[in-house]
Image (cartoon, helix red, strand yellow):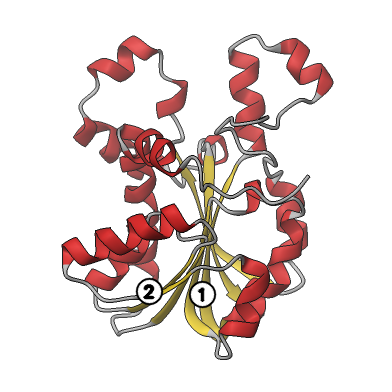
Amino acid sequence: MSDRHFDELATRFAEKIYGGAKGAIRLAVLQADLAETLPDRPLRVLDVGAGLGHMSLWLAQRGHQVTLAEPAEPMLAGARQRFAEAGQHATFIQAPWQDLLGQLPEPFDLVLCHAVLEWLAEPAAILPVLHQLTARDGWLSLAFYNKDALIYRNLLKGHFRKLRKERFAGEGQSLTPQQPLDPHELDTQLAANWQVESRSGVRVFHDYMPPEFQAKAELIDLLEMELAYRRHPNFAGLGRYLHWICRPT
């Protein structure tokens, strides 16, 4: 297994993730968490695996100095276009995470790593690199595909054969991540170098709603409820993605 990039799937990826309520909820939760956490001053920000640059653009519009690193050229081109249309400046680097330390000599105040780990052959291998890229008094914004939620979703759908075989990874051109993350294992892997300061679930209920209820729900109501329950002790762990804000130790 190798790291998965999105050269051939950039357009499909954008439409599927950001074309509806799922993408809107994801951005709303990430932005709310960061708005609560970050100081009111310009920061040097690195977005690892920046994709189409949605989060980076939001941060640039808030006055931060943003660098986007993305290995897939079509994704980076989409990010450039998005920034140009918004009249915002950023630094764009086409490179995989393995090459970043050699190209970025100084650590950053804030490092974003959103929906990256689950596409890597060895997700834990990126953690020391993220630590070196983050300033000692900085923040890591880590969002990842939640294996627990994937298991629960398969239970609800009655996919018991898949669960018995522990076949959780997407295959071929699937947009299901190839390495869903066990949050308990990731917590242990982070413990040596990071303190997790906040934990939120992304889509803690939306994806479990029957389709007819999803279709009837207003986006403004979905966003309100997802934000209200994203840290609820009984529901946060059901998020299809989890968002952890970490500080180096």
* 46 lies left or right of 29: right
Circle on res. 139 = 1
Return the residue nearer the eye: 136 or 13.
13
- Residue behind mark 2: 38
Return the residue nearer the eye: 108 or 51.
51
Q: Position of residue 163 (x, y in %)?
A: 76, 19
Is residue 19 visible to the viewer in this orientation of the structure?
A: yes
Q: Position of residue 135 (x, y in %)?
A: 55, 85
| CB atoms of marks 1 and 2 within 8 Å | yes
| Above/below status of 185 relative to 236 | below
| Above/below status of 55 relative to 5 | below
What crowding class fits label 1: few (fewer than 14 Cα within 10 Å), some (14-19), or many (20 or more)? many
Check the picture and name the quadrant holding the C terminus. bottom right
Q: Earlier in the sequence, mark 1 or mark 2?
A: 2
Q: CA distance from mark 1 to mark 2?
A: 8 Å
Q: Position of residue 126 (x, y in %)?
A: 70, 65
Disc 1 residue type (three-letter): Trp
Return the residue nearer the eye: 191 or 16.
16
The residue drawn where x is 46% and y is 47% is: 231
The residue drawn where x is 31% and y is 33% is: 21
What crowding class fits label 2: few (fewer than 14 Cα within 10 Å), some (14-19), or many (20 or more)? some
